[in-house]
Amino acid sequence: MEKKVKKTDEQWRSALTEEQYHVTREKGTERPFTGKYHDHKDKGMYVCVSCGEKLFHSDTKFDSGTGWPSFYKPHSDGKVAEEVDQGHGMVRTEVICSSCDAHLGHVFPDGPRETGLRYCINSCALEFEGQEDEEN
């Protein structure tokens, strides 16, 4: 496994916007239909806003109607980790970046038939690298 990206709270706060920090470090959620990538259709790679890890390819993105970018699988095995989230009076599966432990969103078992999964991800937890910038 690759080395984990570790920063102090002060370093995270200076590297991220207030909203990015709230979502990725404090496990917040952006409001639906407000994120810059919920209706984004360009080809390329979605990467972690905190560390740049490649997380989801645009080919796996689909319109779930939920107001958040949704993907049916990560870019490759081991790029995202899952943890049980029992907050807000429910049990969900949280999705985090395997490299820096940034909270990304949640995964649900109601996705398209390719995998049956819906990775529901906060736009502000992502950056986008267009196809022409993308490395294989």
Image (tube, helix red, strand yellow):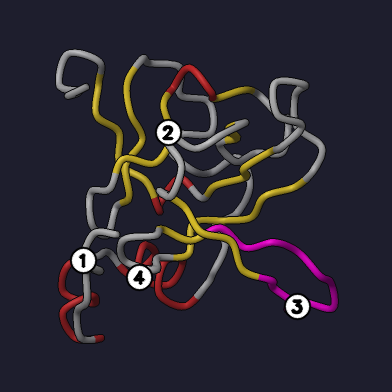
Q: Which residue is mark 4?
A: 21
* 135 in relation to 90, above or below: above
- Give percent across and percent down for residue 13: 23, 77
- Give percent across and percent down for residue 54: 31, 40
Give the CA separation, mark 3 to mark 4: 21 Å
Question: What kind of residue is marked 4?
Answer: Tyr
How would you rate the neighbour count of disc 4 (Cα within 10 Å): few for under 14, some for 14-19, many for 20 or more?
A: many
> Which mark, by number, is residue 76?
none
> Foreground mark, 1 or 3?
1
> Foreground mark, 3 or 2?
2
Q: Which residue is mark 2?
A: 75
Q: Are marks 1 and 3 in contact (CB under 8 Å)?
A: no
Whether residue 96 appears in magenta in the rendering, the answer is no
Quarter residue 120 falls in: top right
Question: What kind of residue is marked 1?
Answer: Lys
> Foreground mark, 4 or 2?
2
Choose the circle earlier in sequence order: 3 or 2.
2
Q: Are marks 3 and 2 in contact (CB under 8 Å)?
A: no
Question: What kind of residue is marked 2?
Answer: His
Q: Which residue is mark 1?
A: 3
